[in-house]
Amino acid sequence: MAGKTVLRNVRVFDGNKLTAPRTVVIDGTVIGEDPAGGREIDTAGATLLPGLIDTHVHLHVPENLVTLAAWGVTTGLDMACWPAERVASLRAVTGAADFRTAGLPAIGPGGNHAKMSAMPDEAIILTADDARRHVAARAAEGADYIKGVAEAPGEGGPPADVLRALVAAAQEHGLKTVVHAASPGAYSLAVDCGADFITHVPLIGPIRSEDIAAMQAAGQVAIPTLTMMEGILTTGPLAGRFPADGLLRSLADLRAGGVEILAGTDANGEPGAPGAVRHGESLHHEFELMAKAGMTSAEILRSATTDAARAFGLTDRGTIAPGLRADLVLIGGDPLEDISATRDIRAVWCAGTGITAAANRSEKDG
Protein backbone atom coordinates (compact mmCIF):
# COMPACT_ATOMS: atom_id res chain seq x y z
CA MET A 1 0.00 0.00 0.00
CA ALA A 2 1.43 3.37 -1.00
CA GLY A 3 1.91 5.83 1.84
CA LYS A 4 1.93 9.60 1.84
CA THR A 5 4.63 11.60 0.05
CA VAL A 6 4.84 15.39 -0.01
CA LEU A 7 6.60 17.04 -2.93
CA ARG A 8 7.72 20.55 -1.99
CA ASN A 9 8.86 23.35 -4.30
CA VAL A 10 7.71 21.59 -7.45
CA ARG A 11 6.59 23.31 -10.65
CA VAL A 12 3.48 21.65 -12.05
CA PHE A 13 2.48 21.44 -15.71
CA ASP A 14 -1.15 22.58 -15.66
CA GLY A 15 -1.89 21.92 -19.34
CA ASN A 16 -0.59 25.24 -20.57
CA LYS A 17 2.31 26.40 -18.40
CA LEU A 18 4.43 25.54 -15.41
CA THR A 19 3.10 26.88 -12.13
CA ALA A 20 5.19 28.64 -9.54
CA PRO A 21 6.81 26.20 -7.09
CA ARG A 22 4.10 24.58 -4.96
CA THR A 23 3.32 21.48 -2.90
CA VAL A 24 1.79 18.27 -4.27
CA VAL A 25 0.66 15.48 -1.95
CA ILE A 26 0.64 11.81 -2.95
CA ASP A 27 -1.81 10.17 -0.56
CA GLY A 28 -2.00 6.45 -1.13
CA THR A 29 -3.07 5.86 -4.74
CA VAL A 30 -4.38 9.37 -5.37
CA ILE A 31 -3.34 12.99 -5.27
CA GLY A 32 -4.25 14.41 -1.87
CA GLU A 33 -4.47 17.79 -0.19
CA ASP A 34 -3.28 17.35 3.42
CA PRO A 35 0.53 17.11 3.75
CA ALA A 36 0.44 16.22 7.46
CA GLY A 37 2.43 13.11 8.29
CA GLY A 38 3.88 12.62 4.84
CA ARG A 39 7.44 11.87 3.80
CA GLU A 40 8.82 15.17 2.55
CA ILE A 41 10.84 15.60 -0.64
CA ASP A 42 12.24 19.00 -1.61
CA THR A 43 12.32 18.90 -5.41
CA ALA A 44 14.30 22.15 -5.64
CA GLY A 45 12.14 23.49 -8.45
CA ALA A 46 11.93 20.35 -10.56
CA THR A 47 8.99 19.86 -12.94
CA LEU A 48 6.04 17.57 -12.25
CA LEU A 49 4.06 16.18 -15.18
CA PRO A 50 0.94 14.04 -15.14
CA GLY A 51 1.83 10.45 -15.92
CA LEU A 52 2.38 10.09 -19.66
CA ILE A 53 -0.03 8.11 -21.85
CA ASP A 54 1.20 6.32 -24.95
CA THR A 55 -1.92 5.91 -27.08
CA HIS A 56 -0.53 3.11 -29.28
CA VAL A 57 1.50 0.27 -27.81
CA HIS A 58 1.61 -3.52 -28.11
CA LEU A 59 1.98 -5.51 -24.91
CA HIS A 60 3.40 -9.00 -24.80
CA VAL A 61 4.83 -9.67 -21.32
CA PRO A 62 4.63 -7.98 -17.89
CA GLU A 63 8.10 -6.48 -18.36
CA ASN A 64 6.62 -4.22 -21.06
CA LEU A 65 4.51 -2.52 -18.38
CA VAL A 66 7.52 -2.18 -16.08
CA THR A 67 9.60 -0.62 -18.86
CA LEU A 68 6.84 1.82 -19.82
CA ALA A 69 6.60 3.02 -16.23
CA ALA A 70 10.37 3.45 -15.92
CA TRP A 71 10.19 5.97 -18.77
CA GLY A 72 7.30 7.89 -17.20
CA VAL A 73 4.60 6.21 -19.30
CA THR A 74 2.09 5.34 -16.59
CA THR A 75 -0.67 4.29 -19.02
CA GLY A 76 -0.29 2.32 -22.24
CA LEU A 77 -3.15 1.92 -24.69
CA ASP A 78 -2.63 -1.48 -26.27
CA MET A 79 -3.80 -1.95 -29.86
CA ALA A 80 -3.70 -5.74 -30.19
CA CYS A 81 -3.30 -8.29 -27.42
CA TRP A 82 -4.60 -11.85 -27.42
CA PRO A 83 -5.62 -14.40 -26.33
CA ALA A 84 -7.83 -13.31 -23.44
CA GLU A 85 -5.61 -15.29 -21.04
CA ARG A 86 -2.63 -13.10 -21.92
CA VAL A 87 -4.68 -9.96 -21.30
CA ALA A 88 -5.78 -11.36 -17.92
CA SER A 89 -2.17 -12.07 -16.93
CA LEU A 90 -1.18 -8.51 -17.79
CA ARG A 91 -4.09 -7.09 -15.84
CA ALA A 92 -2.77 -8.92 -12.78
CA VAL A 93 0.51 -6.96 -12.86
CA THR A 94 0.88 -4.42 -10.05
CA GLY A 95 3.42 -1.70 -9.39
CA ALA A 96 3.82 -0.86 -13.08
CA ALA A 97 2.05 1.01 -15.86
CA ASP A 98 -1.73 0.67 -16.19
CA PHE A 99 -3.15 -0.25 -19.58
CA ARG A 100 -6.25 -0.60 -21.72
CA THR A 101 -6.57 -2.95 -24.70
CA ALA A 102 -8.48 -3.61 -27.90
CA GLY A 103 -7.90 -7.35 -27.61
CA LEU A 104 -7.83 -9.11 -30.97
CA PRO A 105 -7.84 -6.69 -33.94
CA ALA A 106 -10.23 -6.92 -36.90
CA ILE A 107 -8.37 -7.38 -40.20
CA GLY A 108 -8.93 -8.41 -43.81
CA PRO A 109 -7.59 -11.52 -45.54
CA GLY A 110 -4.66 -9.65 -47.11
CA GLY A 111 -2.17 -7.05 -45.92
CA ASN A 112 0.72 -7.41 -43.48
CA HIS A 113 -1.44 -8.23 -40.46
CA ALA A 114 -2.90 -11.32 -42.13
CA LYS A 115 0.64 -12.57 -42.79
CA MET A 116 1.65 -12.55 -39.12
CA SER A 117 2.15 -16.16 -38.06
CA ALA A 118 0.45 -15.73 -34.70
CA MET A 119 -2.66 -13.99 -36.08
CA PRO A 120 -5.73 -16.26 -35.63
CA ASP A 121 -8.28 -16.69 -38.40
CA GLU A 122 -10.87 -15.27 -36.02
CA ALA A 123 -9.40 -11.82 -36.63
CA ILE A 124 -10.47 -11.79 -40.30
CA ILE A 125 -13.75 -10.04 -41.05
CA LEU A 126 -15.24 -10.35 -44.54
CA THR A 127 -18.89 -9.36 -44.00
CA ALA A 128 -20.95 -7.04 -41.83
CA ASP A 129 -22.08 -10.08 -39.82
CA ASP A 130 -18.42 -10.95 -39.22
CA ALA A 131 -17.84 -7.42 -37.96
CA ARG A 132 -20.75 -7.59 -35.55
CA ARG A 133 -19.62 -10.99 -34.24
CA HIS A 134 -16.09 -9.66 -33.78
CA VAL A 135 -17.25 -6.70 -31.72
CA ALA A 136 -19.59 -8.85 -29.62
CA ALA A 137 -16.73 -11.26 -28.86
CA ARG A 138 -14.34 -8.48 -27.88
CA ALA A 139 -16.97 -6.82 -25.71
CA ALA A 140 -17.62 -10.13 -23.95
CA GLU A 141 -13.88 -10.44 -23.26
CA GLY A 142 -13.83 -6.97 -21.69
CA ALA A 143 -12.01 -5.06 -24.45
CA ASP A 144 -11.81 -1.34 -23.80
CA TYR A 145 -12.20 -0.29 -27.46
CA ILE A 146 -12.17 -1.93 -30.89
CA LYS A 147 -9.20 -1.96 -33.27
CA GLY A 148 -9.69 -2.36 -37.02
CA VAL A 149 -7.20 -2.37 -39.89
CA ALA A 150 -7.90 -0.49 -43.11
CA GLU A 151 -5.94 -1.17 -46.28
CA ALA A 152 -6.01 0.72 -49.55
CA PRO A 153 -8.69 -0.61 -51.94
CA GLY A 154 -7.54 -3.87 -53.50
CA GLU A 155 -4.88 -4.57 -50.87
CA GLY A 156 -6.76 -7.14 -48.83
CA GLY A 157 -8.34 -5.15 -46.05
CA PRO A 158 -11.97 -5.31 -44.93
CA PRO A 159 -14.34 -3.70 -47.47
CA ALA A 160 -15.63 -0.22 -46.71
CA ASP A 161 -19.09 -1.46 -45.73
CA VAL A 162 -17.57 -3.99 -43.34
CA LEU A 163 -15.46 -1.32 -41.64
CA ARG A 164 -18.56 0.85 -41.28
CA ALA A 165 -20.39 -2.13 -39.74
CA LEU A 166 -17.48 -2.60 -37.31
CA VAL A 167 -17.73 1.02 -36.16
CA ALA A 168 -21.52 0.87 -35.89
CA ALA A 169 -21.38 -2.34 -33.85
CA ALA A 170 -18.78 -0.84 -31.53
CA GLN A 171 -21.00 2.17 -30.97
CA GLU A 172 -23.90 -0.13 -30.07
CA HIS A 173 -21.68 -1.69 -27.39
CA GLY A 174 -20.55 1.70 -26.12
CA LEU A 175 -17.01 1.21 -27.43
CA LYS A 176 -14.81 3.55 -29.45
CA THR A 177 -12.92 2.43 -32.53
CA VAL A 178 -9.30 2.83 -33.58
CA VAL A 179 -8.54 2.14 -37.24
CA HIS A 180 -5.05 1.54 -38.64
CA ALA A 181 -4.25 3.36 -41.89
CA ALA A 182 -0.75 3.44 -43.38
CA SER A 183 -1.44 4.72 -46.91
CA PRO A 184 -3.49 7.59 -48.37
CA GLY A 185 -6.11 5.14 -49.68
CA ALA A 186 -6.41 3.38 -46.34
CA TYR A 187 -6.66 6.75 -44.62
CA SER A 188 -9.63 7.70 -46.79
CA LEU A 189 -11.37 4.43 -45.84
CA ALA A 190 -10.66 4.99 -42.15
CA VAL A 191 -12.11 8.49 -42.28
CA ASP A 192 -15.14 7.35 -44.26
CA CYS A 193 -16.00 4.51 -41.86
CA GLY A 194 -16.40 6.95 -38.98
CA ALA A 195 -13.63 5.64 -36.71
CA ASP A 196 -13.08 7.66 -33.56
CA PHE A 197 -9.29 7.42 -33.89
CA ILE A 198 -7.10 6.93 -36.95
CA THR A 199 -3.68 5.58 -36.11
CA HIS A 200 -0.51 6.14 -38.17
CA VAL A 201 0.10 8.54 -41.04
CA PRO A 202 0.75 7.35 -44.61
CA LEU A 203 4.22 5.98 -45.21
CA ILE A 204 4.23 7.38 -48.74
CA GLY A 205 2.21 10.31 -49.96
CA PRO A 206 0.14 12.96 -48.21
CA ILE A 207 -3.23 12.66 -46.51
CA ARG A 208 -5.91 14.06 -48.83
CA SER A 209 -7.05 17.54 -47.84
CA GLU A 210 -10.66 16.33 -48.13
CA ASP A 211 -9.96 13.64 -45.53
CA ILE A 212 -8.41 16.14 -43.13
CA ALA A 213 -11.41 18.42 -43.48
CA ALA A 214 -13.77 15.49 -42.89
CA MET A 215 -11.82 14.42 -39.80
CA GLN A 216 -12.00 17.88 -38.33
CA ALA A 217 -15.72 18.18 -39.03
CA ALA A 218 -16.47 14.78 -37.48
CA GLY A 219 -14.17 15.21 -34.47
CA GLN A 220 -11.99 12.27 -35.47
CA VAL A 221 -8.63 12.08 -33.71
CA ALA A 222 -5.22 11.29 -35.22
CA ILE A 223 -2.54 9.12 -33.59
CA PRO A 224 0.36 9.54 -36.05
CA THR A 225 2.95 7.09 -34.55
CA LEU A 226 5.76 8.93 -36.30
CA THR A 227 8.35 6.81 -34.53
CA MET A 228 7.13 3.57 -36.07
CA MET A 229 6.65 5.07 -39.51
CA GLU A 230 10.10 6.67 -39.41
CA GLY A 231 11.58 3.30 -38.44
CA ILE A 232 9.94 1.54 -41.39
CA LEU A 233 11.34 4.15 -43.78
CA THR A 234 14.84 4.34 -42.29
CA THR A 235 15.75 0.92 -40.90
CA GLY A 236 12.75 -1.28 -41.75
CA PRO A 237 11.49 -2.92 -44.92
CA LEU A 238 11.36 0.37 -46.87
CA ALA A 239 14.76 1.63 -45.70
CA GLY A 240 16.28 4.13 -48.07
CA ARG A 241 13.53 3.91 -50.66
CA PHE A 242 11.45 6.92 -49.66
CA PRO A 243 12.18 10.11 -47.69
CA ALA A 244 10.85 10.28 -44.13
CA ASP A 245 10.19 14.03 -44.12
CA GLY A 246 6.72 13.43 -45.59
CA LEU A 247 5.68 12.01 -42.22
CA LEU A 248 6.30 15.37 -40.59
CA ARG A 249 4.37 17.12 -43.35
CA SER A 250 1.38 14.85 -42.75
CA LEU A 251 1.35 15.73 -39.07
CA ALA A 252 1.74 19.42 -39.89
CA ASP A 253 -1.20 19.16 -42.32
CA LEU A 254 -3.38 17.49 -39.69
CA ARG A 255 -2.51 20.18 -37.16
CA ALA A 256 -3.13 22.99 -39.64
CA GLY A 257 -6.51 21.42 -40.45
CA GLY A 258 -7.58 21.54 -36.81
CA VAL A 259 -7.51 17.78 -36.22
CA GLU A 260 -6.82 16.70 -32.65
CA ILE A 261 -3.53 14.81 -32.35
CA LEU A 262 -2.48 12.33 -29.67
CA ALA A 263 0.97 10.92 -28.96
CA GLY A 264 1.47 7.24 -29.74
CA THR A 265 4.45 5.19 -30.81
CA ASP A 266 3.42 1.63 -31.85
CA ALA A 267 5.93 0.32 -29.31
CA ASN A 268 6.34 -3.43 -29.59
CA GLY A 269 8.68 -6.22 -28.66
CA GLU A 270 7.72 -9.16 -30.79
CA PRO A 271 9.43 -10.54 -33.94
CA GLY A 272 7.67 -9.82 -37.20
CA ALA A 273 6.79 -6.20 -36.58
CA PRO A 274 7.76 -3.88 -39.46
CA GLY A 275 9.80 -1.70 -37.13
CA ALA A 276 11.44 -2.14 -33.72
CA VAL A 277 10.07 0.48 -31.33
CA ARG A 278 11.15 0.38 -27.69
CA HIS A 279 8.53 0.65 -24.97
CA GLY A 280 8.65 3.87 -22.99
CA GLU A 281 11.77 5.46 -24.43
CA SER A 282 10.09 5.79 -27.82
CA LEU A 283 7.46 8.21 -26.52
CA HIS A 284 10.16 10.77 -25.83
CA HIS A 285 11.41 10.38 -29.38
CA GLU A 286 7.83 10.78 -30.59
CA PHE A 287 7.67 14.08 -28.71
CA GLU A 288 10.80 15.28 -30.50
CA LEU A 289 9.40 14.35 -33.91
CA MET A 290 6.13 16.11 -33.09
CA ALA A 291 8.13 19.22 -32.23
CA LYS A 292 9.96 19.01 -35.56
CA ALA A 293 6.55 18.93 -37.27
CA GLY A 294 5.62 22.24 -35.65
CA MET A 295 3.67 21.30 -32.53
CA THR A 296 4.39 23.39 -29.45
CA SER A 297 5.72 21.75 -26.31
CA ALA A 298 2.46 22.44 -24.48
CA GLU A 299 0.47 20.80 -27.30
CA ILE A 300 2.76 17.78 -27.22
CA LEU A 301 2.51 17.35 -23.46
CA ARG A 302 -1.28 17.67 -23.57
CA SER A 303 -1.39 15.06 -26.35
CA ALA A 304 0.11 12.54 -23.94
CA THR A 305 -1.72 13.64 -20.78
CA THR A 306 -4.91 15.70 -20.60
CA ASP A 307 -6.05 15.24 -24.20
CA ALA A 308 -5.25 11.52 -24.33
CA ALA A 309 -7.09 10.84 -21.07
CA ARG A 310 -10.16 12.80 -22.17
CA ALA A 311 -10.30 11.25 -25.65
CA PHE A 312 -10.20 7.70 -24.28
CA GLY A 313 -12.53 8.38 -21.36
CA LEU A 314 -9.87 7.97 -18.66
CA THR A 315 -11.50 10.41 -16.27
CA ASP A 316 -9.29 9.55 -13.29
CA ARG A 317 -5.99 10.72 -14.79
CA GLY A 318 -4.31 13.07 -17.25
CA THR A 319 -3.92 16.07 -15.00
CA ILE A 320 -2.63 16.84 -11.50
CA ALA A 321 -5.54 17.54 -9.18
CA PRO A 322 -6.77 16.23 -5.81
CA GLY A 323 -8.68 12.96 -6.03
CA LEU A 324 -7.15 11.81 -9.32
CA ARG A 325 -4.77 8.87 -9.65
CA ALA A 326 -1.28 9.69 -8.47
CA ASP A 327 0.29 8.98 -11.86
CA LEU A 328 3.17 11.44 -11.87
CA VAL A 329 6.55 12.05 -13.51
CA LEU A 330 9.18 14.28 -11.91
CA ILE A 331 11.73 15.63 -14.38
CA GLY A 332 14.56 18.10 -14.40
CA GLY A 333 14.52 21.12 -16.68
CA ASP A 334 11.68 22.89 -18.45
CA PRO A 335 9.96 20.80 -21.15
CA LEU A 336 8.15 23.88 -22.43
CA GLU A 337 11.51 25.33 -23.38
CA ASP A 338 12.95 22.04 -24.67
CA ILE A 339 10.70 19.00 -25.04
CA SER A 340 13.70 16.68 -24.69
CA ALA A 341 13.72 17.59 -20.98
CA THR A 342 11.09 14.85 -20.54
CA ARG A 343 13.95 12.36 -20.81
CA ASP A 344 15.53 13.67 -17.58
CA ILE A 345 13.35 11.54 -15.32
CA ARG A 346 13.99 11.91 -11.60
CA ALA A 347 11.04 9.91 -10.22
CA VAL A 348 7.85 8.19 -11.35
CA TRP A 349 4.71 7.19 -9.45
CA CYS A 350 2.05 4.81 -10.80
CA ALA A 351 -1.11 5.11 -8.70
CA GLY A 352 1.10 6.33 -5.85
CA THR A 353 3.67 3.54 -6.11
CA GLY A 354 7.21 4.74 -6.66
CA ILE A 355 8.88 3.33 -9.78
CA THR A 356 12.58 3.01 -10.51
CA ALA A 357 13.24 5.51 -13.30
CA ALA A 358 14.89 4.31 -16.50
CA ALA A 359 18.17 6.10 -15.75
CA ASN A 360 18.51 4.09 -12.51
CA ARG A 361 17.60 0.64 -13.82
CA SER A 362 20.22 -2.04 -14.43
CA GLU A 363 20.87 -3.51 -17.87
CA LYS A 364 19.03 -6.71 -17.00
CA ASP A 365 15.84 -4.72 -16.34
CA GLY A 366 15.57 -3.82 -20.04
Image (spheres, rainbow, N blue to C red):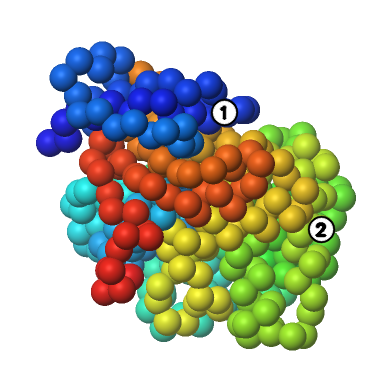
Q: Nearer the viewer, residue 306 or 50?
A: 50
268 or 121: which is nearer to us?
Answer: 268
| Residue located farthest toward the left when viewing the structure as drawn | 1
Q: Position of residue 90 (x, y in %)?
A: 25, 57
Q: Which residue corresponds to the image point at 29% horizontal and 32% vertical from the top-left?
A: 41
Question: Looking at the picture, which amino acid does disc 1 mark?
Answer: Leu
Q: Quadrant of the N terminus?
A: top left
Q: Which residue is mark 1?
A: 18
Q: Give the total of numbered labels.
A: 2
Query: Which circle's residue, 1 or 2, is located before the other in the chain?
Result: 1
Report the side of 28 relative to 129 (left or right): left
Relative height, residue 140 to residue 32 (above, below):
below
Question: Mark 1 Cα within 10 Å, few/some/many (few <14, many 20+)?
Answer: some
Q: Can residue 244 be seen from the camera position used here?
A: yes
Between 254 and 86, the residue placed more toward the observer is: 254
Secondary element at tag 2: helix
Q: Quadrant of the C terminus?
A: bottom left
Verify CB contact (< 8 Å) between mark 1 and mark 2.
no
Q: Secondary structure at mark 1?
A: loop
Q: Which one is in front in this view, the residue at disc 1 or the one at disc 2?
A: 1
Give how far apart the Cα atoms at labels 1 and 2 are.
29 Å
Looking at the image, residue 273 lies above or below residue 174 = below
| Residue 194 x, y percent position in the rendering | 65, 44
Residue designated by label 2 = 249
Is residue 125 at all visible to an observer of this figure?
Answer: no
Residue appearing at x 67%, y 58% in the figure:
289
Q: Position of residue 50 (x, y in %)?
A: 45, 35
The residue positioned 49% from the left and 29% from the top of the image is: 11
Q: Would residue 128 be found to the left or right of residue 137 on screen?
A: right
